Image (spheres, rainbow, N blue to C red):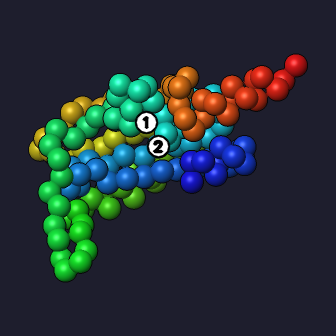
Amino acid sequence: INAMRLDKGTEVPVLHVRIRGNGECVQTFWAEGRRLGCFRCLLQAEHKHYRQERFPVLKELPTRKQLGCNGFTPYAVSAPMAAAALCLEVVVDWLQYGRASPRFRTSAMANANVYGVKNQDVSRLAACPACGPRDAQATAIRP
Ligand SMILES: [Zn+2]
């Protein structure tokens, strides 16, 4: 989805939402334009820390379960409800104020053992494999 948004150069915003771990927290990322970071910018791009989280939130690996041939990560039913609520909060800000800042938001469950992640507008990574080279090419083409 991120690559498609960048390829098309669309001005249509994309709202990503995810449940982290076993539902310890939920996160949203609003992707729009090219001034700020893209979804891939949430992961490190440098060789030494490649694909490690730029803003780690989980202190422990999530518990995984196996049922027959299927593996899954269990979480409480409240996690998707919290994710939907955070999405609505972002959309309401966008409709009310015309912008969805802070674009990257984290909402942790009470008593969750997670690192605090500040709600913020994520800056672009110059070495981002998704948005970095595209803009470098676009800049090189421009006179
Ligand atoms: Zn990026």
Q: Residue at x 52, y 50 (%)?
A: 15
Instruction: Name the residue tied to disc 2.
Output: 29
Residue 110, how many percent across, how many down?
A: 16, 46
Residue 111: name its quadrant: top left
**Distance CA(mark 1)–CA(mark 2):** 9 Å
Which residue matches tag 1? 42
- Amino acid on which the number 2 mark rests in the picture: Phe
Earlier along the polypeptide chain: callout 1 or callout 2?
Answer: 2
> In the picture provided, is 74 more to the left or to the right than 121?
left
SS of the residue under disc 1: helix
Disc 2 C-beta below 8 A from ligand 1: no
Residue at position x 69%, y 29% in the image: 135
Q: Quadrant of the C terminus?
A: top right
Which quadrant is home to the N terminus?
Answer: bottom right
Residue 132 percent location from the top left of the image:
60, 29
Q: For numbered disc 2, what is the local secondary structure?
A: strand
User: Do residues under tags 1 and 2 come within 8 Å of each other at their CB atoms?
Assistant: yes
